[in-house]
Image (spheres, grey):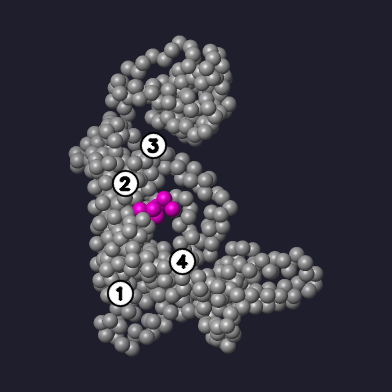
Amino acid sequence: MAPDPPDAPDDGPRGERGRGTGAAALLPLLGGAGNLTSVTNCMTRLRVTVRDPSAVRRDELRALPGVLGIVEDGTALQIVLGPGAVAKVAPELARYVEAAGAEGAAPEAVTAEALAERGAALRAERKARNATPAKEFLRRIAQIFVPLIPALIGCGIVAGLAGLLANLHWLPALAPALTACASGFMSLIAVFVGYNTAKEFGGTPVLGGAVAAIIVFPGVDRVTAFGEKLAPGQGGVLGALAAALLAAHVERWCRRRVPEALDVLVTPTVTVLVAGLVTLYGLMYAAGEAATAIGRFADWLLANGGAAAGFVLGGLFLPLVMLGLHQALIPIHTTLIQQQGHTVLLPILAMAGAGQVGAALALYVRLSHNASVRRTIRSAMPAGLLGIGEPLIYGVSLPLGRPFVTACIGGAFGGAFVGLLGQLGDTVGSTAIGPSGWALFPLLQGGHGPVRAVTVYGAGLLVGYAAGFAATYAFGLSRESLRELNAGGEKSPSGE
């Protein structure tokens, strides 16, 4: 039994009887210590999760002195107490809950539905935190490239097939045709990027495409900028992105100032002329230098710090996704594919998903009495193996907290393995972005052929699975969490 709270809220956070609200006053109105599954707080709010929302006496809670408001979301309850007060109430309330868990009867089992609710709340909280101007800009940049992913995947697979036939000396007459099918889109990807950029940023899409097409026009080799002749394609997708973004701004400026009768003639002309000249005499050169630097840095990263870089990239990728910062990598991937034919970063980052799979397998083994969570893991596992990590992340590992961290550790070891082999000369790259996990196998290329690339990547996945499993099995659940998750459940006849 939990210790009985005092009869009156003498431990109020403001230090005076009758002023403020203490844990002893809140506890019975929340349904008692046995009705609380978690107690946390932020700067102003006491955050609790309840087993039975109907046991909460909301009207009496609102009437308590010091309670400034209540926010409900399913089983999650936020009680606004204000700064200072909440810092005193939360630890006291947590001690009552801890005592109830230690001395009371076995706690109720945590179901997959409860974990899903926690995951949904975490997803909503993450979405709200990510709604900053900088992250919104990154999201819009990502939206430019997302519609291109199907073509990148299709052309990447065709390019891999063409390379396989060339290496095996099969169907020599067909290989050039396959190469043409795969390379046509990539040779004009700048135009598509320009089109989507203008569309995303409020310009006329075809004008964005027209300005970006300047970059791939063969005649640009007769233009000199900064003392050097330009080369067709110089600047690539980064140049196209900047050119179309400028075109959208010029077009909007013109439409606000040009009379409507002249708009159809003047605005397109000024847009193409101004944005086109700036592209030729500035953006192509600057974007070309940036693209070259990205390629050199990626090569240097694997050649000199492959294992360490892979450990960091594989371990931090999912937290970057949670923060919305992963979208900044999409133009980098696309630039590397355009430059080198593949991106060496994606196979390393894909190891993050392997860590999630390994962590989920460990939870499946350890939670032998929680059939509900095990069913969720089984249903989410096929998607996880194909690189779709959201069901496992938001349905299992992230709501539990610690397993998300151990899953990232698994991804770090998988990334370190792929990075180490890349440092030793067995580089692995993906000819497209989008797929991950097992779905990435058809898109792999490497310095020693596709078979070697598939072998290295597959071994990296196994390392990620094993490391995520071991870390989660050993450290993913505390004794209290394990007891709570396995409480009240029974093994099925099949052993679940």
Q: Horizontally, is 392 left or right of 208 in the view?
A: left
Q: How many marks?
A: 4
Q: Horizontally, is 459 left or right of 70 in the view?
A: left
Q: Quadrant of the N terminus?
A: top left
Q: Amino acid at mark 1?
A: Gly
Earlier along the polypeptide chain: callout 4 or callout 2? Answer: 4
Earlier along the polypeptide chain: callout 1 or callout 2? Answer: 2
Relative vertical location of residue 114 with respect to residue 452 in this rendering, above or below: above
Q: Are the residues at dot 4 and dot 1 in contact (C-beta closer than 8 Å)?
A: no
- Residue 342 visible in rendering: yes
Q: Residue at 33%, 66% (x, y): give it.
A: 304
Q: In the rendered image, which residue does mark 2 sit on?
A: 406
Q: CA distance from mark 2 to mark 3?
A: 21 Å
Magenta stretch: dominant secondary structure: helix
Q: Amino acid at mark 3?
A: Ala
Q: Residue at 48%, 79% (x, y): give it.
A: 187
Q: Was residue 250 drawn as part of the magenta stretch in this picture?
A: no
Name the quadrant containing residue 38.
top left
Q: Residue at 52%, 46% (x, y): give it.
A: 129
Q: In the rendered image, which residue does mark 3 sit on?
A: 114
* Residue bounds of the magenta highlight: 315-320
Where residue 34 appears, as percent x and y from the top left, is: 37, 23
